[in-house]
Image (cartoon, rainbow, N blue to C red):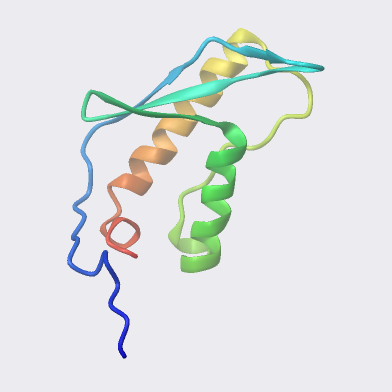
């Protein structure tokens, strides 16, 4: 019996407006974790951590190759200052916007 993909009928169009907002940091001993609130077309979608977005980037590179995926903001070893957090937020927002507007990446299953 042939199995059908339940998502085969879904078509995804590029999204025009991705915004990332810093969530107040949460203390998880022994460190502080920074979350990023993802808004799509002005509506809150989810909260993610840098590592989750990095994992997404790695999966996209594996699936589509390094040349098809936009550059991802580098990891920092030391705790980030407020201005570094804002810089990272802006770079992550640009990354998500670029991925979300790439019809090849968006329409993949």
Residue 26 on image: x %, y %? 62, 13
Q: Residue at x 41, y 31 (%)?
A: 93
Q: How many marks?
A: 0
Give the quadrant of residue 72.
top right
Is 99 placed left or right of 43 in the picture?
A: right
Q: Residue at x 21, y 38 (%)?
A: 16
Q: Residue at x 30, y 55 (%)?
A: 106
Nearer to me, 37 or 90: 37
Is 30 placed left or right of 48 in the picture?
A: right
Give the quadrant of residue 34.
top right
The image shows residue 58, relative to residue 27, as above or below, that is: below
Residue that extends furthest to the bottom in the rendered view of this protein: 1
Name the quadrant of the C terminus. Answer: bottom left
Give the quadrant of residue 18.
top left
Residue 97 on image: x %, y %? 34, 39
Name the quadrant of the N terminus. Answer: bottom left
The image shows residue 96, relative to residue 84, as above or below, that is: below
Is 44 placed left or right of 76 in the picture?
A: left
Residue that extends furthest to the front in the rendered view of this protein: 1
Residue 37 on image: x %, y %? 42, 23
Residue 98 on image: x %, y %? 35, 44
Nearer to me, 89 or 25: 25
Q: Residue at x 19, y 52 (%)?
A: 13
Nearer to me, 102 or 8: 8
Is 60 placed left or right of 80 in the picture?
A: left
């Amino acid at each position: 019996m042939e199995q059908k993909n339940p998502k085969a009928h879904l078509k995804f169009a590029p999204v025009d407006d991705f915004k990332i907002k810093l969530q107040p940091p949460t203390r998880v001993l022994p460190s502080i974790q920074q979350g990023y609130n993802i808004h799509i077309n002005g509506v809150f979608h989810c909260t993610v951590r840098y590592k989750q977005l990095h994992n997404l980037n790695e999966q996209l590179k594996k699936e589509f190759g390094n040349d098809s995926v936009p550059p991802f903001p580098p990891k920092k070893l030391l705790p980030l200052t407020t201005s570094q957090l804002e810089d990272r937020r802006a770079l992550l927002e640009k990354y998500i916007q670029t991925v979300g507007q790439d019809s090849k990446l968006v329409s993949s299953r």
